[in-house]
Image (cartoon, coloured by chain):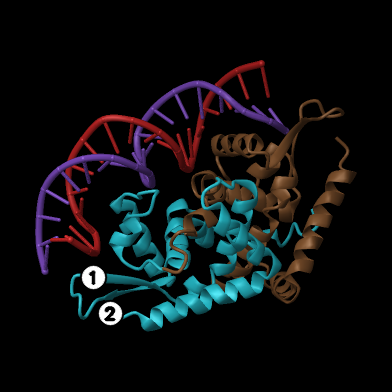
Chain colours: A cyan, B brown, C red, D purple
Amino acid sequence: MPNSVSFRSICPVATSLDIIGDKWTLLILRDMIWGHKSLFNEFQQSPESMPSKMLANRLKKLEELGFLSKTRGNLNKKSVYYLLEKRGLDTFPIMVEMAIFSTKHFFDHLGTTYTKEARTTMKTDRQGYISELITNYKKFKRNLVI
Amino acid sequence: MPNSVSFRSICPVATSLDIIGDKWTLLILRDMIWGHKSLFNEFQQSPESMPSKMLANRLKKLEELGFLSKTRGNLNKKSVYYLLEKRGLDTFPIMVEMAIFSTKHFFDHLGTTYTKEARTTMKTDRQGYISELITNYKKFKRNLVI
DNA sequence: CCGGATCCGTTTCGATACTG
DNA sequence: CAGTATCGAAACGGATCCGG
């Protein structure tokens, strides 16, 4: 056990695993990163159709922990925009590694063409791919008329 | 929504999130990677003290999905060794990204000295750090007398 | 209509105890 | 040592309802 003293502190658990090691949280992050979703309704429309209760619960947690911010619309007084903050952007590398792993081990034969292309990009230029995702998200956020 | 067609297939959910997006699974992987744990009892001794029921359940799932293999001891007929297979080793990049994220955002001030050092290594030479972890694990597995 | 909250039957969790 | 058994508590998830 080479790092027996440290392995706990390297990966502190209580706080980060409760949020990162959670299916619904990861689905929300995925939808924000690759789908640029920001509205309650948009998340609900994902193929996994997460119950509104779970969605509301996780969005609140993510907000409390500073992953995202909640903004009520000015034009659209009804809409509430959930947008990633710095801490949320810092999850991109984790999500990309998960994506790489998923396409390698649990590839489900949907969207073959694009996925193969994305898979190559992710692996050959991982950091570039992550940077591009972040840039795209920031651009989306900037251009969003609330 | 730039990748609206593909974002689902990039990160297929049903299969991989049920195992990767799970707190107990991640704790087991963490203990195997950084703690070189392989026995039921060793996992139980982690500070998070996962219930034996959860542990047994997740070990079974991880075995069924090919992340690890289960070997009954020859010398120690009572012992059962859980050891990572290729698919398990492929989770290292994910785990390292989580570790980087955790130390950045939820650092809990335990084991400060080593963690700072590890944090630097992880960030400055991420791929090297991952390779080293994998090499160390393989060495541990090779040298293990069952 | 959008963003949730509430209700309720079912599943899972998690703590403790127990067994081969 | 490596798991089961049990059982109350919590979470899930599907449907419906509600307020702005």
**What label sits on residue A115 in the rendered view?**
none
Chain name for mark 1: A
| Chain of the residue displaying label 2 | A
Is disc 1 in contact with disc 2, using a CB cutoff of under 8 Å?
yes
Callouts 1 and 2 in the same chain = yes
- Amino acid type, residue under disc 1 in the picture: Ser
User: Which residue is found at the position 70% from the left and 67% from the top?
Assistant: A124
Residue linked to disc 1: A79
Q: Nearer the viewer, residue A88 or B79?
A: A88
The answer to whether residue B40 shows anywhere in this view is: yes
The tag earlier along the polypeptide, 1 or 2, is 1
Q: Is residue B99 above or below residue C16?
A: below
| Front residue of this view, candidates B59 and B93 | B93
Residue closest to the far front: A113
> Disc 2 residue type?
Ile
Q: In this rendered view, identify the residue nearer to me: D12 or A34.
A: A34
